[in-house]
Image: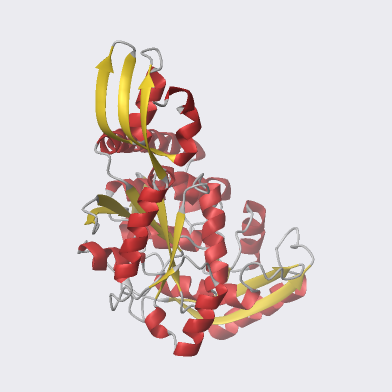
Amino acid sequence: MQFTEEQKEKAIMVGVRIGKDTHQGLTLDESLQELELLADTAGIEVVGSITQNLSSPNSRTYIGKGKLEELRLLAEELDADTILFDDELSPRHQRELEKEFTTKTKILDRTALILDIFAQHADTREGMLQVELAQYKYRLPRLTRAWTHLARQTGGASGRSGSVGGVGLRGPGETQLEVDRREINKRIDKLEDELEKVRQHRNRYRQQRRKTNIPVVALVGYTNAGKSTLLNAMTDAGIYVADQLFATLDPTTRQLELPTGETVLLTDTVGFIQKLPTDLVAAFRATLEEIAEADLLLHVIDGSHENAESQRLTVLETLEEIGAGEIPILTVYNKVDLLDAEDFQELKKSTDPSAVFISAKDRSGFAELIESIAAGVTQNFKRVTVLLPFEAGRLVSMFHEKGHVDTLEHVEEGVRITGSLPVQLMSFFEDYQE
């Protein structure tokens, strides 16, 4: 979505360093740089910022009294209509901060901003349902004032009006006061029911897909790492690509034929980011299960980014959170065409020796990448022949769902299956090997 200068809201960013930097994630300055990119993606112009060091957030207004007054004066001076906090505010912080500013000034936090961007970029019915559910869960405890950003899902950036799920969004200062909590809860229940149907449909689809014995390779990574560009380059998928955060949300799956003649399914998934809202992770459970069910993960990293290591760790933490931490990972450093020779050699020295270095834009490094994918989807499987007794129907089903069945024969003693199984499942079949 493109915004004109007249449409853009003006925002002041607020960053708070709690305690000391651990240097395990982004520093405060780096986090604010990322927040500014998020704001730009949402059509908000950042006109200023303030920061504060605190041992713990102020119990009432998150930032201290003096800093709050400084923020109020800066907003007046710069004619800012939005105050954008880099962390998620509690409902109490949200309410108290709103009391400190005029009704024309919106208080947004990072979570609300990410939800806004997701609402702009969700194109499929599933994506829209997921975003709407996350919005309502976020808004439910905050029924004090409207966040007009959240109206964009249907109302558009310029009109700032519309409706989401049948609840009117009529303008600043109205919606949150008018939305009935009971109606929102009813809508949440309905959305969860619809998304459960989506989850069941995806599960049936995965079961059918497993019967074809085609390995699944999921592309994961920090937002804007180049996953969609890579999938386009490898399969001519035709996915929308833009140099912005969360340009695409909905998963896309395409077939890729390997040099061995084997076919794999490549699935592009939503990008991750630090401080990814918990409600959003929960709402996208059906989509994220595509990652958890993959045979191999391609962790695409922007090798040219100054915070590449922090982004890598954020993705690994999120994979653990969604139950995909045990899936084999092939690390792929993208955008190496943007590195000079010295930086490229330094990157190669500092990372996993099995990592692959590519440029999805120039399609360089693809031969090695495809070889590594072929090795990755085969090395995690072991070829085996087992004779399973008829009463071991659960194991027969497991072999079909998780393995690759080459031949199946019903004999007097049971079911003889020849094929390949993931090595982590071999212990279930040890007693039945021939």
Whether residue 418 is visible: yes
Residue positioned most to the top:
412
For residue 211, side relative to residue 34 (left or right) = left
The residue lying toward the viewer, choosing from 126 and 379, is 379
Residue positioned most to the right:
55
For residue 353, side relative to residue 163 (left or right) = right
Quarter of the image for residue 153 reads bottom left
Residue 34 on image: x %, y %: 52, 73
For residue 82, side relative to residue 265 (left or right) = right
Quarter of the image for residue 403 reads top left
Residue 200 on image: x %, y %: 34, 33
Residue positioned most to the front:
434
Residue at 31% across, 31% down: 418
Q: How many marks?
A: 0
The residue lying toward the viewer, choosing from 247 and 380, is 380
Position of the N terminus by quadrant: bottom left
In this view, 190 is above or below 150: above
Position of the C terminus by quadrant: top left
For residue 42, side relative to residue 57 (left or right) = left
Residue 148 on image: x %, y %: 44, 61
In this view, 94 is above or below 183: below
Residue at 27% across, 51% down: 264
Whether residue 80 is visible: no
Residue at 41% across, 79% down: 336
Residue 355 on image: x %, y %: 46, 67
Rendering colour mode: secondary structure
The residue lying toward the viewer, choosing from 94 and 354, is 354
